[in-house]
Amino acid sequence: MPWIAAAALLVAGISFADDWLGLHLGYRIVMHFAGAGLLVWIGLDLKSIALSGSAWVLPGALAIGLWLLFVVWMINLYNFMDSMDGFARRPRDVDA
């Protein structure tokens, strides 16, 4: 559990710094991959994909690469959707 907390703190720390300092995308992506890499390092990775009742076992390098991309994708997707709340307001709700 400490390694999962470390990965979460890594991502939360860079996200907090980005909110206050407006960091370059490259710094954030590197830290997102570092957090995802910690998860792979402790053994949390994708071993197979189950689709329609069948499971595809993935080779080691492909499994690690897909897992890293999936975790970084989900971090950025969550961040994007968190920023979308302003688009959901009606025009009369916006302070003029």
Image (cartoon, rainbow, N blue to C red):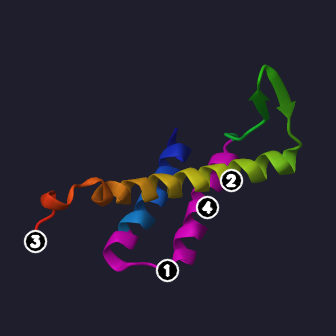
The kind of residue on which mark 1 rests is His
The reply to whether residue 27 is visible in this rendering is yes
The image quarter containing residue 92 is: bottom left
**Which element is circle 1 on?**
loop
Q: Position of residue 77 (x, y in %)?
A: 51, 54
Marks 1 and 3, the one that precedes in the sequence:
1
Which residue lies under the disc numbered 4?
34
Q: Which residues are magenta?
A: 17-42
- Do callouts 4 and 1 mark residues in contact (Cβ within 8 Å)? no
Distance between the alpha carbons at the discs numbered 1 and 2: 20 Å
Q: Callout 3: few (<14), some (14-19), or many (20+) C-alpha neighbours within 10 Å?
A: few
Distance between the alpha carbons at the discs numbered 4 and 3: 42 Å
Distance between the alpha carbons at the discs numbered 1 and 3: 31 Å
Distance between the alpha carbons at the discs numbered 4 and 1: 16 Å
**Residue at x 61% of width, y 50% of height:** 71
The image quarter containing residue 63 is: top right
Q: Callout 4: few (<14), some (14-19), or many (20+) C-alpha neighbours within 10 Å?
A: some
Q: Position of residue 31 (x, y in %)?
A: 56, 66
Q: Position of residue 72 (x, y in %)?
A: 60, 56
Horizontally, residue 59 falls left or right of residue 69, namely right
The kind of residue on which mark 2 rests is Leu
Marks 1 and 2, the one that precedes in the sequence:
1
Nearer the observer: mark 4 or 3; the answer is 3
Q: Position of residue 89 (x, y in %)?
A: 24, 55
Which residue lies under the disc numbered 2?
68
Name the residue furthest left.
96
Which residue lies under the disc numbered 1?
24
The kind of residue on which mark 4 rests is Ala
The kind of residue on which mark 3 rests is Ala
